[in-house]
Image (tube, coloured by chain):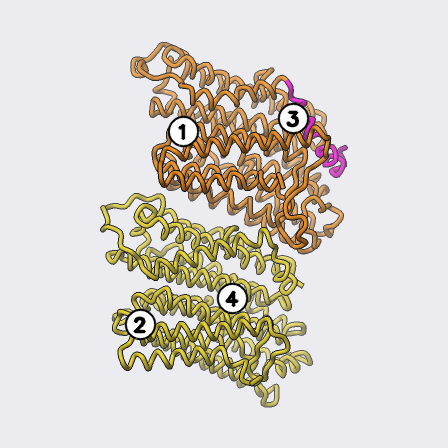
Chain colours: A yellow, B orange
Amino acid sequence: METFLPFAPAAFGVAGAVLAMLFDAWDHRLAAVIAAISLLVVGAGVASWSIVATGLAGTSVRSGGVVSLAPAVCLALGALALAGCAGSLSVDRTGSRVTALATLAASASALAAAASDIGVLFLAIEALALCGYGLVALGGTDRAREAAMKWFVQGSVATVVFVLGTAALIGRTGGSLNYDAIAGVAAGSLDGPMAVGFVLVLAAIAFKLGAFPFHSWMPDAYETAPPAASAVLASAGKVGPLAAAVWLALAVTGSAGERVVRVVAVLAVCSIVFGNLAALRQRSLARLLAYSGIAQVGYALVGVPLGTRSTSVLIFAVLYGLTAAGSFVLVEALHRTDPGWDGGIKGLAGLSRRQPALALSLAAIMFSLTGIPLTAGFWGKFLVFAGASVGGYLWLAIAGVLGSVVSFGYYGAVIRSAYIDEPEQESAPARAGGAASAMTVGIAVAIVVAGVAPLFFGLAPILRAVVR
Amino acid sequence: MILTLLALLPLAGALVAWAAGARNPGSARVVALAVSLAQLALTATVAVAMTGASHAALTGGLTGMPDSFWLLRLDGLALPLVALTSLLGVVAVLASWRVGDRPGAHFALLLTLQAAVTLVFMADHLVLFYAAWEAVLIPMFFLIGGWGHSGRRHAAMKFFIYTFAGSALMLVGLMIVAFSTGELRISALSAGMLDPGIRTLVFWLLVAGFAVKVPVFPLHTWLPDAHVEAPTAGSIMLAGVLLKMGGYGLLRLALPLSPEAARVAAPIFAVLGIIGIVYGAVLALAQTDLKRLVAYSSVAHMGFVVLAISVGTPLALQAAVLVMIAHGLISALLFLVVGQLYDRTHTRSLARLGGLMATLPLWSTIFIFASLAGLGLPGLAGFPGELLTMLEGFTAWGWWMAFVALGVVVAGAYGLRAIRHVAQGPALPEWARLHDLDAIDLAAALPLVVGIVAVGVWPSFVGGVAAPVMRALAATLGRG
């Protein structure tokens, strides 16, 4: 039982995917969605229970304490995203396949977050990527298939890089790929092959995350994939690899390894600069979110080189994941309430009068992505940048906050469109958004509650764990 | 408890006003007025409790909870600014009494803004302070964007991004303070807790946020657009209290945490303050748009605050508080009357206006009164603080004050020019059929007029409240 427990959350997710595929065979799309969500919730529940349960551990996959945070969140975000998009998933012809693959992606991401062995991590991350290729291809359009192909080709390169890095590491640890074994060797002496192996593995993870300069697959993929797929990939799909990067980096810090981890700092700052500048030019909301996602990965990576403070990245990832899921469910809700919407930011003009609740949620989500206080996003950035500013990376913190300022140039433009701009033509009468609208509003409320509550109750438990 | 109420009452009122406005648009303003009056009464109660019992400061919030960020403190520096905020809250509601476009949302945003600004002045926790500081931007962004004039689309974004850029750097400074000292309570912080090596860095990071808000020349470029495009109530709050957040931040955090850096920076502040005074006045003189003229005069008056802070003596620091309160009252009155005029004439162009004394005698009287207060007429609020700044500045910086005097002369010129172009001269037929101020308009202006006279004849009232805090600060700076 105890050896099974670390695998349990992801296993429940996989079971959900299998059920979804079975229901698909009998064309029960709604049942497929419900089954997938239920089992994801069960998996998230088991992982959440592991957070508070003490003394859990495993050999190749761990659980217990803060380690279980990211797996729980991956599965919960998967459930949230599927629930938000349940409307189209239960109607579209390919709905069940999207459901099954997205559930698998969330489970793979959860497994990556829990892995404590590079072999397991590799398999989990590859499984996540394979689900991603399929999900994008299920978009059904020529552009979607092209985006999936592009991602697949580039992803293959990342896979090879991962294998090369693993090969370099395995030679130095005498066959073991366990993080502890790597940490042991790194603590002794971190020589050339080991450092190269480590940088290669980190680069491969950075590719999966879409950090600059490994980002070019992301905008096309997120724009053309079904909204449910984008919602899962952009939230759950990021949290797992980010957590993995944190655990890996922790394995080699405290020694000469810190120099290696500094590579991540460069990636972070490049991602922040590039993602923000590129997002400023976007006209489509989904593309804007994809490019801004590059910058958000950059903010998260700011925390990775911080040694023991790097666990702040986990908090950032959780809060960002929630907001990112909200943002793509919002895209789905916007499509459902106005089938004529072309996905452009200009098309949001007048939203505050047509759909007041949805517009207010949009504002909360955009403020949260910017990192404005009173929203969840603020606390994530606060913890990461605070860690950087006292942890010897002041320049990274400054790059991060300035990047956030620039980001309001486009996040704010979305709010401006929804609230200030007058629509060019009378739009069709508003339609109910169903589950998508309800879920968007729900996530927005969660974002504001998570943003305001710490003002009264403090962050002490989190701070004690994160900023030691 | 009473401080928590002071911070949250407008917020609760905002929700009620919003809900009321959704059912019956006319009721939102009544709710907003009632809430802002209650807030004013509450502020008066707190002020009496504090001065009457000669408490140095009131503390409140969730003090019983060890990890809570919700710690509030009201001392002699914060009290005048909170009182100003509460007073202008009432004025802003009355100024937007006739808003017809989504009144529920409008009044809710105004009250939210008031809550956030009040919280900035009362926060005793670094994180709460920053959260309140940024929270101010959100309602202001929507007020400018949703109810502003023709250039609102651009102005709302510019306002947000400029001030966010400053405060983002300030956030880095606050985080360094918080995590290198381990102390998050503002009142418990002192320079000695910071490593001397990082004090200068912290100082300039904090100043980046505060200087944009003040605004210190050359970081003022967001101000004219935001002030001009904002609706009247927004301009009143912007010029009246939002700019004071910058001065407050300098006095509350930047100077006490790094006195050495403040001493090194003093000449820079003095020069920038003087440039602000002269530059703001000269640009105000050159404006053809009445609201823009008032906006640039704000740059000049806030220059006095920067200059006074650069001197750093107890009297100079009191003068800084005094100028902030005076400018809060005067600029609010000026924006109010300019807004009232625009409602009637739909123009703010000096070239098109004239002879309004004949058709709008009441309005013109208040306008002339406000302009005279703005140019620093003795007996009105603007005079004592600016005079004291110059006197103290003379002991510190000598004959550089001649430039300040030049700025004051130019201030006289633009004030009188505005009066001549708008109120005096032959009555124009175009404006023959205007309605003069009604009871609501007068009710909005009256508290400000009374306040301006009161601070003008009895400045030591404000200065005296702030004096103990300012003396302590001057001692920290080594100028006590």
Q: Which-is-in-front pick, marks 3 and 1?
A: 1
Q: Secondary structure at mark 2?
A: helix
Residue A419: x and y in percent read 36, 45
Q: Amino acid at mark 4?
A: Leu
On the question of residue B296 being in view, the answer is yes
The image quarter containing residue B56 is top right
Residue B363 at x, y percent in the picture: 42, 17
Chain ID for label 4?
A
Q: CA distance from mark 4 to mark 2?
A: 42 Å
Identified by mark 2, the residue type is Leu
The magenta span reads B458-480
Q: Position of residue A177 (x, y in %)?
A: 57, 85
Query: Circle 3: is it few (<14), some (14-19), or many (20+) Cα within 10 Å?
Result: many
| Marks 1 and 4 belong to one chain | no
Q: Which residue is mark 2?
A: A30
Q: Chain of mark 1?
A: B
Q: Using residue B267 as the reference point, say whether residue A118 is left or right of it.
A: left
- Overall secondary structure of the magenta stretch? helix
Q: Secondary structure at mark 4?
A: helix
Q: Is residue A339 above or below residue B345?
A: below
Rendered view: B307 above or below B207: above
Q: Secondary structure at mark 1?
A: loop
CA–CA distance in space, label 3 to label 2: 68 Å
10 Å crowding of disc 4: few (<14), some (14-19), many (20+): many
Q: Quadrant of the C terminus of chain B?
A: top right
Q: Separation of disc 3 and disc 4 at Cα?
A: 53 Å
Mark earlier in primary sequence (3, 1):
1
Is circle 3 on the same chain as circle 4? no
Q: Nearer the viewer, mark 3 or mark 4?
A: 3
